[in-house]
């Protein structure tokens, strides 16, 4: 397989590496209870054998799940590659600022209560974005379910989906604005034995947006096919650059773009603070860059699984031979 194209002008996509391939992880608001939001990432990484350092931050405990705990971010022995924020909304921005001063350059924020809630939450999210940019932090979330990359046993997520089983080897990446839907794709794939080792959910997209994630996957050697779920598109320039990079690297994107109707757009905004946008414009962009738009999860996985064989037509010259006229029309 030829090397992926990584244009110099798109080096920003590679800046997500600490989010997805970290060597050290801090959990702010770490819990000794494996089933709690601040406990699940630690429990998952311990069970799966994450080789990097895990630093629980909890001022009330000396240890968390058998690991040494630290009373504050400032007390950490080093700047972690990535930090997970799992504290209440009132404490999240201060934690982000402390991480920036420590030298951390990637943060996953589980915390909800920002732009998806009300005007006050939206203002707080603007402040969060400003803090992240002040420190040069790539911020995933807030209000996101996080990331997993089973290739390195990194689990920066609090999903309960792994009760059904761990990811199986495969070359499909999942990029989703919705955490629940992203893990639904994973679960549906797992039921069919389809491998999805990397999943990134973006939530409110205060800093990292879907286009950034698609761009990272478009140049990531561990991903051949991308399944994407979108409620609205922010940072359209990055989004289009990512689609172009995926096409040039021959990595198919199968996307479910919802919010077609006015009611659907309103629902999307209340879910992840998304602006659904003009569906006709979105469709034109997807068509231009060869993105396949799926209508159901089953259709998405059917197409993605077929694409993992990496056998693509050189041009639009396929023919159909069938005994059924109706089937021929449907296929066409």
Image: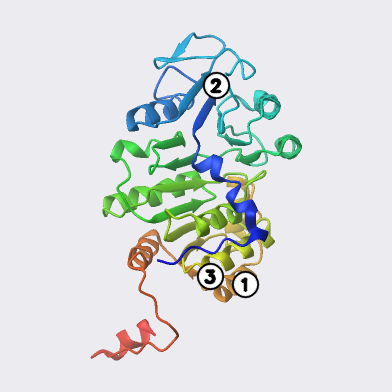
Where the N terminus falls, by quadrant? Answer: bottom left
Give the vertical position of 298 relative to 24 (above or below). Answer: below
Q: Nearer the viewer, mark 1 or mark 2?
A: 2
Where disc 2 sits, the SS reads loop
Report the residue at 50% width, 52% height from top: 175
Q: Which mark is residue 248?
A: 3
- Residue 142 in the image: state x and y as whole percent: 61, 38
Tag 2–tag 3 contact (CB < 8 Å): no
Q: Which residue is mark 1?
A: 280
Decide: few, some or many residues near mark 2? Use Cα within 10 Å; few <14, some 14-19, many ≥20: many
The image quadrant of residue 72 is top right
Q: Nearer the viewer, mark 2 or mark 3?
A: 3
Where disc 1 sits, the SS reads helix
Decide: few, some or many residues near mark 1? Use Cα within 10 Å; few <14, some 14-19, many ≥20: few
- Residue 94 in the image: state x and y as whole percent: 70, 24
Give the vertical position of 65 relative to 258 (above or below). Answer: above
Which sits earlier in the primary sequence, circle 2 or circle 3? Answer: 2
Where the C terminus falls, by quadrant? Answer: bottom left
Left or right: residue 182 compared with residue 88 = left
State the separation of the CA atoms marked 2 and 3.
42 Å
Decide: few, some or many residues near mark 3? Use Cα within 10 Å; few <14, some 14-19, many ≥20: some
- Residue 108 in the image: state x and y as whole percent: 57, 36
Q: Which residue is mark 2?
A: 29
The image quadrant of residue 109 is top right
Which sits earlier in the primary sequence, circle 1 or circle 2? Answer: 2
State the separation of the CA atoms marked 3 and 1.
24 Å
**Is residue 260 visible in the rendered structure shown here?**
no
Which sits earlier in the primary sequence, circle 3 or circle 1? Answer: 3
Left or right: residue 296 compared with residue 239 = left
- Nearer to us in this view, 78 or 269: 78
- Nearer to us in this view, 130 or 53: 53
Colour scheme of the picture: rainbow
């Amino acid at each position: 397989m030829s090397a992926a194209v990584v244009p110099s002008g798109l080096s920003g996509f590679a800046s997500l590496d600490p989010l997805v391939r970290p060597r050290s992880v801090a959990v702010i608001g770490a819990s000794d209870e494996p089933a709690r939001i601040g406990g699940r990432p630690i429990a998952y990484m311990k069970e799966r054998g994450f080789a990097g350092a895990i630093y629980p931050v909890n001022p009330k405990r000396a240890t968390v799940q058998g690991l040494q705990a630290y009373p504050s971010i400032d007390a950490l022995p080093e700047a972690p590659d990535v930090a997970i924020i799992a504290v209440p909304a009132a404490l999240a921005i201060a934690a982000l600022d402390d991480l920036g001063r420590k030298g951390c350059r990637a943060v996953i924020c589980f915390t909800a209560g920002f732009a998806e809630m009300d005007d006050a939450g939206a203002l707080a999210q603007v402040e969060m974005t400003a803090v992240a940019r002040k420190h040069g932090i790539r911020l995933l979330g807030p209000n996101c379910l996080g990331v997993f990359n089973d290739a390195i046993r990194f689990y920066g997520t609090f999903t309960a989906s792994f009760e059904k089983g761990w990811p199986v080897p495969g070359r499909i990446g999942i990029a989703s604005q919705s955490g629940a839907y992203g893990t639904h794709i994973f679960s549906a794939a797992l039921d069919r034995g389809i491998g999805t080792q990397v999943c990134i959910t973006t939530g409110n997209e205060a800093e990292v947006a879907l286009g950034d994630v698609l761009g990272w996957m478009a140049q990531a050697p561990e991903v051949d096919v991308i399944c994407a779920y979108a409620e609205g598109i922010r940072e359209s320039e990055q989004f289009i650059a990512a689609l172009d990079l995926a096409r040039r690297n021959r990595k198919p994107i199968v996307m479910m773009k919802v919010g077609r109707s006015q009611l659907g757009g309103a629902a999307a905004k209340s879910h992840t603070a998304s602006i659904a946008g003009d569906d006709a414009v979105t469709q034109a962009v997807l068509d231009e860059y060869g993105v396949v738009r799926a209508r159901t999860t089953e259709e998405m996985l059917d197409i993605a699984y077929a694409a993992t064989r990496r056998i693509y037509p050189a041009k639009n010259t396929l023919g159909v031979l069938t005994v059924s006229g109706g089937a021929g029309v449907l296929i066409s």
